[in-house]
Amino acid sequence: MTSEGHDCRVSFSSLAGLMLVFASVFCVSPGALAHGVPEASRDALTGGGILEYTWTGAEHMLTGYDHLLFLFGVLFFLQGFRDVVKFITAFTLGHCITLLGATLAGITADAYLVDAVIALSVIYKGFENLKGFERFLRIRAPNLLAMVFVFGLIHGFGLSTRLQELPLGEEGLVSRILAFNLGVELGQVAALTLMLGLFNIWRKSKTFERFANISNGALVLAGVGLFFYQVSGYLNEADHVGVHDSSVEEHGHHINAPESEQGVGHEHGDEHEHGGAHSNVEEEVIEPANEVDNEPVNDEAVHSHDHGHGHHSH
């Protein structure tokens, strides 16, 4: 077999493996794709302590599609353990600032829009790895360490938006959030150290460059797909809210409608009932007066007065 055929087979196998990975990302639950918090993590966050928060932070990193895709892109720029610690610390620092600050200040945004921005960060990383800035924009790529810090800010804000939906309580909140970020740091360092070891072995292979191009192209496509998924979720949510508000407004109009629109028969029934009650009261008041004055009762006057009162109730 020629080396060209061998490279072609490796390329196709690499592409198939990558598509399987990204397909699994798109097949996860909608809650996960919306930067949601799983039920088990919700229980740990609402009633857990420092250890539970630390473990949940590490678990969040290992199960969050946004973290995994972004870190996969960062891998291509890492050379050793020192790079891992440096870049992950920059990411975690940004993550901690917005997670802690936004949660304490009560600053929120629509989760779908925040996750759409996070999807753009995935596109950015794949585009940078493909040297898109130099090839297409004819400019140097921004400083990677600074961009990792910025993306940490965005990811932290996205998680803060979700956490504020939970009854976290105020006691020890700062220490718990710091413990969560510690878990994020430890989880990322552990995962990237293992993955980087495999990457460094593969770098020596002639197929690595081809694999890098294919995988980063797939990374861009995954980011595009996730971006449109989040935008679609936001638009559907807005439509649902609009229909719900319209239904509430219509229902409220029916409740507050004029009596003439709510039911003529019911009104006439009440009128007849009230009319009869008023008539009896008037007769009881008039009769004793007639007894005192010894004057005959004028039936026509009484009937005219009752009819007029009933007409007024209309």
Image: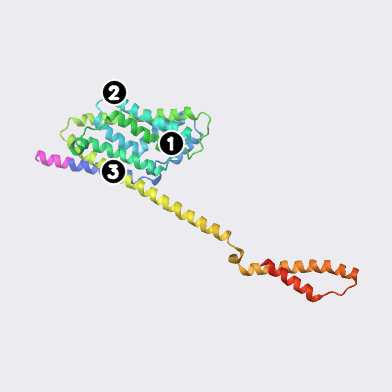
- Residue 200 in view in this figure: yes
Q: Which amino acid, by three-letter code, is at mark 1?
A: Ser
Q: Secondary structure at mark 3?
A: helix
- Range shown magenta: 1-10
Residue 222's label in the rendered image is 3
- 3 falls in the magenta region: yes
User: As drawn, is 59 to the left or to the right of 286?
Assistant: left
Q: Which residue is mark 2?
A: 82
Res 153 → quadrant? top left
Main SS of the magenta segment?
helix
Q: Secondary structure at mark 1?
A: helix
Q: Which residue is mark 1?
A: 160
Check the image and report above or below for 130 versus 174. Answer: below
Check the image and report above or below for 198 versus 17. Answer: above
User: As drawn, is 32 to the left or to the right of 147?
Assistant: right
Identity of the residue drawn at 37% across and 35% down: 155
Residue 24's label in the rendered image is none
User: In 3D space, how far apart are the residues under numbered discs 1 and 3 (Cα atoms)?
Assistant: 24 Å
User: As drawn, is 263 to the left or to the right of 277?
Assistant: left
Q: Which amino acid, by three-letter code, is at mark 3?
A: Ala
User: In 3D space, how far apart are the residues under numbered discs 3 and 2 (Cα atoms)?
Assistant: 29 Å
Q: Secondary structure at mark 2?
A: helix
- Residue 191 in view in this figure: no
